[in-house]
Structures are given as structure tokens and as C-alpha cells.
């Protein structure tokens, strides 16, 4: 299943799904319940990444039933965490915290420090959504400390991003950008393209708000190049839209038009009426 995990990390959802599905079929045929349940959990993860909640929960429940029957605590700890994430997505924060705490307790029992670091981030997120900022901050800092101690670079990157977000929430853009940039460099180093593209976009947006358009343009272009490699046309269109806005502010109208027309072509292809109207409005506003 390693190949599937690599594809998942790189945002290659369909390829990852195919890999995990093949693995699940092999494990099921061999009557390897433990690995079959793990493969089902990963299939659920892919559907979760694609925003398909019903399919996600279907596979999580099936995996959970098998893991419970064979007492696979490692898989159960992961499932408690992931089911908590689904509750968080649907704004059931107290329910999410129940599952996260179960996951955290089990991961600590198993000595899974990487898992503890990840679940602390999720607990922090739930507290953040409940406007419990002090609790959220404590969780993020704890997660960062653990991830650094064990050399878990992905965990360090995520914790840095969350701490940056926390600073931004308090109006401190300078420190927020510092943490975002640290996070970005790690995601690029470990070849996590989806996260690198996202953080680049976020940094660009913050520089745009600060009227630092050249800096914003640099990060939007960085995000664009990464997103082209991920074959997600809508994300490409979004980056192009923001690039056009930067050029507009910089009075580079020809470049703005080119970026917006490229974005518009994608939105029309995907039949995204809201964004078609938005970008057409930008083009009409050109001098």
C-alpha cells in the first residue's frame, strides 16, 4: 500500500484510489483482515480528500467493524481520528472532540508519537472553530514540539502553518507569514505538492491584502506551477485569477487580461457560472 500512500500525499486521488482498491481486493482474497481493514480506511481517506462524505463514512464504518472484531488498536486509533475529522467538517465540533480524544488516548497507549502530534493538531482545530483560541494554541505548540523531537517533518510543517494561522487571527501578519513560509519550505522539501500549492496561495493572498503585489505575484505563480502538475484545472484557474488581480494593481493590463482569459476558458469548460461572471467582470473593468 506504500505506492497508494505516496500517490495520496501527492494529491493523485484517482491513482491512489486504484492502488488502495487493488490492495483491498488482494488482502480480502488472502483473508488478511487486518490489512484489508487498513486498505478500506485508506479508501475512505481518498474519498474524504475528494469531499465525498457518504463514501468516506461507508469505508470507515466497514474498516471500524473489522478492526474492532480483531482488536487492531493501531487502525482503531487512526479511525477515531478520521471519523472525528468528518464530524469537524460538518461542524459537529463537540462530537469531533470526543473522537479525537479517544484517538489521542489510544495513540499515547501505543506510543505512537507521530499519531499523537497529528491528533493534537485536530483537537486544536476543533477548539479553534469553537473560538477557544488558548486551547487551540496549546495543542499546536505541543504538536510542534513532538514533531520536532521525532523528526516528523510533515507534522512540523502542519504545526507551523496552524501557529501561523493563529497569529493571523490575532492580526499579526508579520509572524503569520514567517510561520507560513517555514511551513512551505518543508512541504516543498518533502514533495507534498498539494500542501505546497495551498500554502503558496495563502502567502500570496496575505501579501495581496498588504498591497505588496510583487510578492503576492511571486507566490501565486509558484502555486500555479505546482497546481499545473496536479492536473486540477479549477485550482489552476483560481491561481490565474489571483495573478490577474496582481497585474491589474501593478497596472500591467495586458498581462492581467491574459491571465483572466486563461482562467475564464477553464471556468467555461467546467461550467462554473459564478466564476465565469466574476472573471468576466474583471475583464470588463480593464482600461
Image: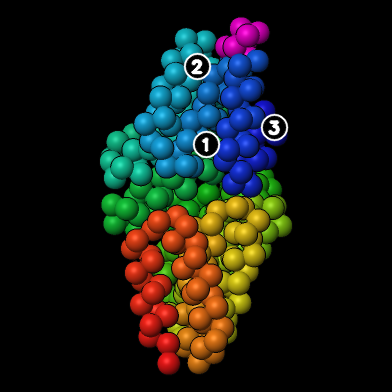
**Quadrant containing the C terminus in the rendered view:** bottom left
Name the residue located 35 percent from the left edge and 47 percent from the top edge. 126
Q: Which residue is the site of mark 3?
A: 2
Please state the horizontal and vertical placement of residue 124, each as a whole percent of the image.
Answer: 41, 50
The answer, for residue 179, to whether it is visible in the render is: no
Measure how far apart labels 3 and 1 are at the Cα level: 14 Å
Q: Residues within 10 Å of mark 2 (few under 14, many from 20)?
A: many
**Quadrant containing the N terminus in the rendered view:** top right
Name the residue located 52 percent from the left edge and 10 percent from the top edge. 70
Q: Which residue is the site of mark 1?
A: 46
Measure how far apart labels 2 and 3 are at the Cα level: 20 Å
Instruction: Work out whether mark 1 precedes mark 2 in sequence or the reverse, and give the earlier one.
Output: 1
| Residue 67 image label | 2
Name the residue located 50 percent from the left edge and 73 percent from the top edge. 261
Which span of residues is magenta-colored?
27-33
Q: Nearer the viewer, mark 3 or mark 1?
A: 1
Q: Secondary structure at mark 3?
A: helix
Name the residue located 65 percent from the left edge and 15 percent from the top edge. 26
Please state the horizontal and vertical placement of residue 238, each as a whole percent of the image.
Answer: 48, 65
Measure how far apart labels 1 and 2 are at the Cα level: 19 Å
Please state the horizontal and vertical placement of residue 183, each as a whole percent of the image.
Answer: 59, 61
- Is residue 32 a member of the stretch shown in magenta? yes
Q: Residues within 10 Å of mark 1 (few under 14, many from 20)?
A: many
Relative to 115, is 256 above or below?
below
Q: Residues within 10 Å of mark 3 (few under 14, many from 20)?
A: few
The answer, for residue 272, to whether it is visible in the render is: yes
Q: Nearer the viewer, residue 73 or 272?
A: 272
- Is residue 204 a member of the stretch shown in magenta? no
Amino acid at each position: 500500500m506504500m505506492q497508494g500512500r505516496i500517490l495520496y500525499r501527492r494529491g493523485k486521488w484517482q491513482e491512489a484510489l486504484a492502488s488502495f482498491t487493488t490492495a483491498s481486493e488482494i488482502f480480502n482474497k488472502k483473508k488478511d483482515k487486518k490489512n484489508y481493514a487498513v486498505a478500506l480506511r485508506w479508501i475512505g481517506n481518498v474519498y474524504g480528500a475528494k469531499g465525498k462524505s457518504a463514501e468516506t463514512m461507508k469505508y470507515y464504518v466497514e474498516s471500524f467493524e473489522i478492526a474492532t472484531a480483531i482488536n487492531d488498536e493501531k487502525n482503531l486509533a487512526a479511525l477515531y481520528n478520521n471519523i472525528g475529522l468528518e464530524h469537524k467538517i460538518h461542524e459537529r465540533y463537540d462530537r469531533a472532540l470526543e473522537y479525537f480524544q479517544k484517538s489521542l488516548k489510544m495513540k499515547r497507549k501505543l506510543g505512537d508519537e507521530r499519531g499523537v502530534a497529528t491528533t493534537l493538531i485536530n483537537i486544536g482545530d476543533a477548539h479553534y472553530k469553537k473560538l477557544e483560541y488558548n486551547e487551540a494554541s496549546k495543542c499546536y505548540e505541543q504538536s510542534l514540539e513532538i514533531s520536532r523531537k521525532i523528526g516528523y517533518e510533515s507534522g512540523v510543517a502542519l504545526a507551523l502553518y496552524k501557529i501561523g494561522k493563529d497569529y493571523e487571527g490575532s492580526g499579526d501578519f508579520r509572524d503569520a507569514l514567517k510561520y507560513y513560509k517555514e511551513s512551505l519550505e518543508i512541504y516543498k522539501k518533502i514533495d507534498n505538492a498539494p500542501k505546497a500549492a495551498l500554502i503558496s496561495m495563502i502567502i500570496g493572498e496575505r501579501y495581496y491584502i498588504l498591497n505588496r503585489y510583487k510578492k503576492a505575484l511571486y507566490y501565486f505563480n509558484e502555486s500555479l506551477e505546482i497546481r499545473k502538475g496536479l492536473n486540477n484545472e479549477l485550482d489552476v484557474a483560481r491561481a490565474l485569477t489571483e495573478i490577474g488581480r496582481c497585474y491589474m494593481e501593478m497596472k500591467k493590463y495586458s498581462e492581467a487580461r491574459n491571465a483572466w482569459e486563461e482562467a475564464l476558458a477553464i471556468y467555461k469548460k467546467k461550467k462554473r457560472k459564478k466564476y465565469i461572471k466574476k472573471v468576466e467582470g474583471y475583464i470588463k473593468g480593464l482600461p
